Amino acid sequence: GTPLLEDRHPATDTMSLSIAYVSLLALWLAPVFVAVPVAANVVVTTAVILYIACHLSLNQRKQGGAGEQGDGAGVGSDKITAEDAVRFPIVGSGVLFGLFLVFKYLDKDIVNLVFSVYFSLLGTYAIGFVLEPMVSSVLGVDRQSLKSFGPEFNLPLLGPVSLRATWVEALCIVMAAPVAALYFRTKHWLLNNLLGISFALHGIEKMSLGSPKTGMILLAGLFFYDIFWVFGTDKILTGDSVMVTVAKSLDAPIKLLFPKPDNATVTEVYGLAVREFPGASHFSMLGLGDIVIPGLFIALLLRYDAERAGADRTEGPQGSFAKPFFHSNLLAYILGLGTTLYVMETFKAAQPALLYLVPACIGAALLSSAVLGEVSSLFAYDEEEKQGADGQGSEPATAPSVESKKKQ
């Protein structure tokens, strides 16, 4: 019989994605009107974000994988190489400790003002690009047929910078600007989360790990990075660990805030009971890195599922195919995050989420490949395009299709 991991479901992916968007909107607003348990809010919200973002990353297959930028919207991606994955924990450690020193020796208000301006500008673009697919659908515009315009230039230290956008993207950026400006003005937790969710969706959609091997290298490195900066520096340099100190000090949408329902102040607005949460102590937080980093790995496995199933590259997020690696890894992520919250609540101490998420995600991928007899295929999968003699990219290395495996 067909293994459980290969069970197919009806072609309802478009409807499922629409339901996920509506669910995410409801989860974002729900704490304002009802008491939502923190643990449930964290787990469900994060799972929905990953579901949407990973499916959006299927747009990368429309041009054969990572590393190629298209003129239209939604298809280009930035590839993280194995060398990048090795360097990432080292560079991240330098940046984290640098921020710790900045907050220790400089005026915290001035530092946060600089970061507020920076992230408000980034948030304008992030919200705009998240809105773009929905606006294109409402306007009946074919995203891939649109031409982009705008300048491209080089900046010292940053390298190439592109401000190219299609007219629909430009419209969405204009629509997003007042929202980012309101965040800059109020720093309201709802707007913080809106920007944070937009960063997560856009990052997972646009970035690619290239191969499972690169993903595992990155996850393994950040596993030790997270443990060291949460536990290894605890009460050595400061009252809290370096990671916790920076997370609490940096007032920027690099984390999602989840209100604690017991701390709400209820007021009536136009006949509705609205819950307010004054004060930072009224929130639990989850760093975007704990969503985006595992999310990139889960998104890669979803694209591997698409390759092994022989899914049509032109369908993007709307394609319907068996997703054993994606489903098992998303479930593992949920269990890992739930374990993090349980341990945090039990010991009343901050926990490095990647301590639990990394083994869960890597373990689920290895277990799924072992059950399906695809260990070698999983490790051979690589999305990097090989350049031919004519300069045209060829198809990326692909997994054996489900149909071909059944014939063997």
Image (cartoon, rainbow, N blue to C red):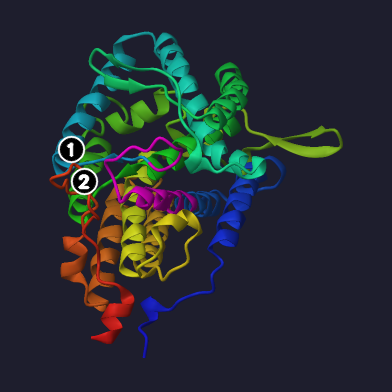
Q: Quadrant of residue 72?
A: top left
| Position of residue 244 measured from the top left corner of the image (x, y, whole percent) | 35, 32
- Which of these two is toward me, 290 or 73? 73
Distance from the alpha carbon under mark 2 to that under mark 1: 8 Å
- Which of these two is toward me, 244 or 188? 188
| Position of residue 213 measured from the top left corner of the image (x, y, whole percent) | 17, 54
According to the picture, the residue beneath numbered tag 1 turns out to be 84
In reply to whether residue 80 is colored magenta, the answer given is no
Give amino acid for label 2: Leu
| Position of residue 81 measured from the top left corner of the image (x, y, whole percent) | 18, 42
According to the picture, the residue beneath numbered tag 2 turns out to be 218
Q: Is residue 299 above or below residue 369?
A: above
| Residue 36 visible somewhere in the drawing | no
Task: Tell me the magenta residue range.
Answer: 52-75
Disc 1 is placed on an element classified as helix
- Is there CB contact under 8 Å for labels 2 and 1? yes
In reply to whether residue 74 is colored magenta, the answer given is yes
Q: Residue at x 28, y 79 (%)?
A: 404
